[in-house]
């Protein structure tokens, strides 16, 4: 699909979600259900790795005593705010934890500036509650969106960059996606490498354990070319119909995790918002049907579950 058609369809889907809001009881917040299981971070220990799927691409990680939160989105809608009203799609699954149930993050990790990954309202709430106490890492040329908030620190990582935060080693990896928050912005997928918005996956390492947070990506051999090996692969699996040029399907996510020699597979980016045209239950069912072909431990099967490595 050409980019002009993609932009047009993106706006039509957003507008449709607003115009059809009376039907939200069939798919949105009016009929949203809580996850059937709930994490218990109050019971986590500093000598454990705990990974909980809160919803969409929001993952809460206890990385041997350091708390990481990825792409936090906790409100009922994601999208454009106009005069205090959000016009984006509604959740059909509540977050597995409320804001007050999430322990203070040491680090918030942001993959890119899309509104379902960099939610200003959620981030503003965290920065207000924990003023100057949270470190933030985000993709190249995206920190301007949230730079006005009260963080302990905020920094950008470009593809291939390596850094350390809170005793955690991080490396930013290139993925196949796009970066603009609004369609008139420059981003790297349009060829603006030096001054366009970027989009990352990250490898996190602590005490000899490596985790991949895949962010958003279409099918790509970039993970294989990186030569990296990880213990846990957290991979997006939804919104691939009709957005295959920007989102991988579940089989492709499994293959990319295999390219990284992952031992544990954890799915994200599904079963939270209606973003693609695939049936709601299809992505997770696809994983369940296909994962036996790969040498993975299926770490998390549904929102609210927790994977534990002692």
Image (cartoon, grey):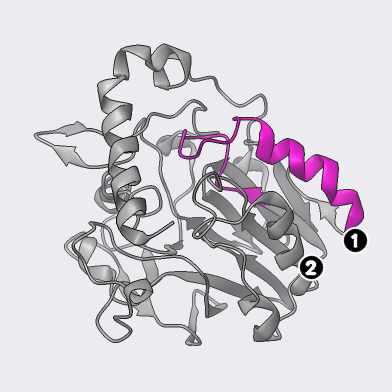
Q: Is residue 191 left or right of residue 174?
A: left
Q: Which of 151/301 is in front? A: 301
Residue 59 within the magenta-colored segment of the rendering: no
Q: Is residue 305 left or right of residue 109?
A: right
User: At 49% from the left edge and 28% from the top edge, which residue is drawn?
Assistant: 94
User: At 27% from the left edge and 50% from the top edge, which residue is drawn?
Assistant: 120
The residues colored magenta run 267-294
Image quarter in which the N terminus is found: bottom left
Q: Quadrant of residue 228?
A: bottom right
Q: Is residue 8 left or right of residue 247?
A: left
The reply to whether callout 1 and callout 2 are in contact (CB within 8 Å) is: yes
Q: Is residue 107 left or right of residue 171?
A: left
Q: Quadrant of residue 226?
A: bottom right
Across and down, in percent, residue 193 comes to 33, 84
251 relative to 145, above or below: above
Image quarter in which the C terminus is found: bottom right
- The label on residue 295 is 1
Q: Quadrant of residue 221?
A: bottom right
107 relative to 247, above or below: below
Residue 269 within the magenta-colored segment of the rendering: yes
Q: Which of 25/299 is in front? A: 25
The mark that comes first in sequence, 1 or 2, is 2
Find numbered disc 1 in the image and state the secondary structure of the residue it sits on. loop
Across and down, in percent, residue 110 comes to 42, 62
Q: Which of 184/45 is in front? A: 184
Cα distance, mark 1 to mark 2? 8 Å
User: At 45% from the left edge and 56% from the top edge, which residue is drawn?
Assistant: 105
User: At 38% from the left edge and 60% from the top edge, which residue is drawn?
Assistant: 2
Across and down, in percent, residue 117 comes to 40, 53
Q: Mark 2 = which residue?
A: 258
Find numbered disc 2 in the image and state the secondary structure of the residue it sits on. helix
């Amino acid at each position: 699909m050409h980019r002009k058609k993609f932009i047009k369809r993106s706006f039509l889907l957003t507008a449709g979600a607003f115009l059809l809001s009376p039907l939200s009881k069939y798919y949105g917040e009016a009929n949203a259900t809580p996850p059937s299981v709930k994490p218990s971070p109050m019971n986590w220990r500093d000598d454990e790795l705990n990974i909980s799927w809160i919803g969409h691409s929001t993952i809460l990680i206890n990385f041997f005593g350091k708390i990481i939160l990825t792409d936090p989105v906790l409100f009922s809608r994601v999208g454009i705010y106009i005069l205090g009203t959000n016009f984006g799609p509604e959740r059909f699954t509540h977050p597995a934890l409320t804001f007050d149930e999430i322990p203070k993050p040491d680090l918030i990790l942001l993959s890119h500036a899309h509104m379902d990954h960099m939610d200003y309202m959620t981030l503003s709430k965290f920065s207000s509650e924990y003023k100057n106490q949270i470190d933030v890492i985000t993709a190249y040329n995206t920190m301007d969106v949230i730079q006005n908030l009260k963080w302990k620190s905020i920094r950008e990582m470009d593809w291939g960059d390596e850094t350390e935060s809170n005793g955690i080693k991080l490396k930013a990896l290139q993925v196949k996606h796009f970066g603009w928050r609004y369609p008139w912005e420059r981003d790297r997928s349009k060829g603006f490498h030096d001054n366009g918005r970027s989009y990352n996956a990250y490898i996190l390492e602590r005490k000899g354990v490596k985790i991949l947070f895949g962010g958003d990506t279409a099918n790509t051999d970039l993970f294989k070319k990186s030569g990296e090996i990880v213990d846990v692969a957290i991979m997006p699996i939804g919104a691939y119909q009709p957005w295959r040029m920007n989102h991988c399907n579940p089989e492709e996510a499994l293959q990319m995790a295999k390219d990284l020699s992952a031992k544990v597979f954890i799915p994200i980016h599904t079963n939270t918002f209606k973003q693609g045209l695939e049936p709601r239950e299809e992505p997770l069912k696809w994983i369940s049907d296909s994962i036996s072909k790969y040498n993975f431990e299926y770490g998390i099967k549904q929102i609210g579950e927790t994977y534990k490595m002692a």
